[in-house]
Amino acid sequence: MAEKYLRENKNSFTIVKGSKTYAKISSFDDAIFIRDLLVENDWNLDKIPQTIKNGDNYLVLSVLDEKIHLIAKYKAEPSQETVDKLTKKHKRNPNNSKYGLNITKVFETFVIKKQIAGDDYIFGYYDNLEDAEFVRNFLMDNDWNVNGFETVNFCDETGMYKVVKVIDDKAYVLDSFTDDNIDLDRVYGEFLSRISKHKYGLASYPHLDLLKDEIESLEEELGVKAVDDVWSFDNITDDGSALNDIIFTLTPFEKSIYDSIGEKTSLEDVKRSLIRYKSKNFDEKIARNLDRLIEKNLVEKVGNDYKKTNL
């Protein structure tokens, strides 16, 4: 049958019958083998096995979007567990893109978005890729049912336990732990603290932006108050406070430095967080503005690190 049903591309071979494309394979020998496999099975994709031997190699195949994908090759036959993991990983990122399906990055925030019946739905915002991938993977495995999360969920990929709270049809990952011995009241209090610090300009958590006006209702629902080792939110009001008066007088660059500082932040950490502002006198400018924040008693230096002052 030679090269029947095969079309040669620059770096691959496409298997085509009529107007339908069945696969795009890098190796000519593998393309021939998969073409023959389709012919033997009367072009029925439901009959394509997950694993099949071709010469000295075992091919792991996945059928996605009505096409066959060759996702791995092994000298020894892989276990079903390995095949299942490879298939899941391929389903989540069939194009080998940076973040996989349904995850985009907007500035420093990872966003899970999916189009359903022609409309775009956002399922969550995250400050790190690991949490975004966990939520995306769970949703893909559960038909995008955002209400399917438990309070504490185990992540097979990382071996971590993740505390999840669904708010207004968006899944928020509150924290991650190595075991399930979790103090939920503490987790809730720290979650509310991050929202409060973002609201009052004490720190920057853009992924929590939608919750700035939900603090009181969340405190009532969760049965806890915001807990923080540095700040007391009882002394901060929406209509202003001594702390807010000081913060609101900061220059934009001072405020950016202030937002970048946590409980233990090195000078290198500050530089990395402000790399977008890098200029000829970048280091001197940061040092000068750090000194100003220390003079205003908003920041203090502890050893070689910086932290916000407990006002």
Image (cartoon, grey):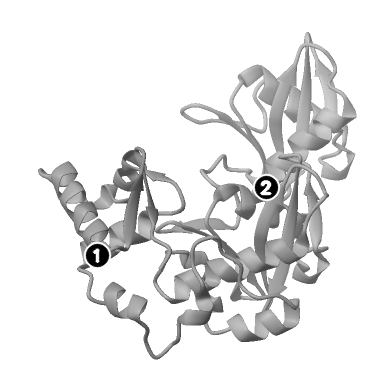
Q: Is residue 53 left or right of residue 127?
A: right
Badge 2 element: helix
- The dot on residue 246 is none
Q: Circle 1 sits on which residue?
A: 296
Kindly identify the amino acid type of the residue bearing the numbered disc 2. Answer: Arg
**Closest to the observer, 26 or 60:** 60
x and y percentages locating residue 307 in the rendered image:
39, 52
Considering every residue shown, the one lying at the far bottom of the view is 239
Specify the quadrant of the image occupied by residue 282: top left
Considering every residue shown, the one lying at the far left of the view is 280
* Quadrant the C terminus occupies: bottom left
Specify the quadrant of the image occupied by residue 190: bottom right
**Closest to the observer, 69 or 82:** 82
Q: Nearer the viewer, mark 2 or mark 1?
A: 1
Q: Is residue 206 left or right of residue 27?
A: left
Badge 1 element: loop
Considering every residue shown, the one lying at the far top of the view is 56
* Quadrant the N terminus occupies: top right
Residue at point 82% right, 50% down?
A: 181
Residue at point 71% right, 26% down?
A: 72
Mark 1 Cα within 10 Å, few/some/many (few <14, many 20+)?
Answer: some
Q: Circle 2 sits on which residue?
A: 92
x and y percentages locating residue 142 in the rendered image:
81, 60
Kindly identify the amino acid type of the residue bearing the numbered disc 1. Answer: Lys
x and y percentages locating residue 42 in the rendered image:
86, 38
**Closest to the observer, 267 or 169:** 267
Q: Is residue 164 left or right of residue 27?
A: right
x and y percentages locating residue 264 in the rendered image:
44, 47
Mark 2 Cα within 10 Å, few/some/many (few <14, many 20+)?
Answer: many
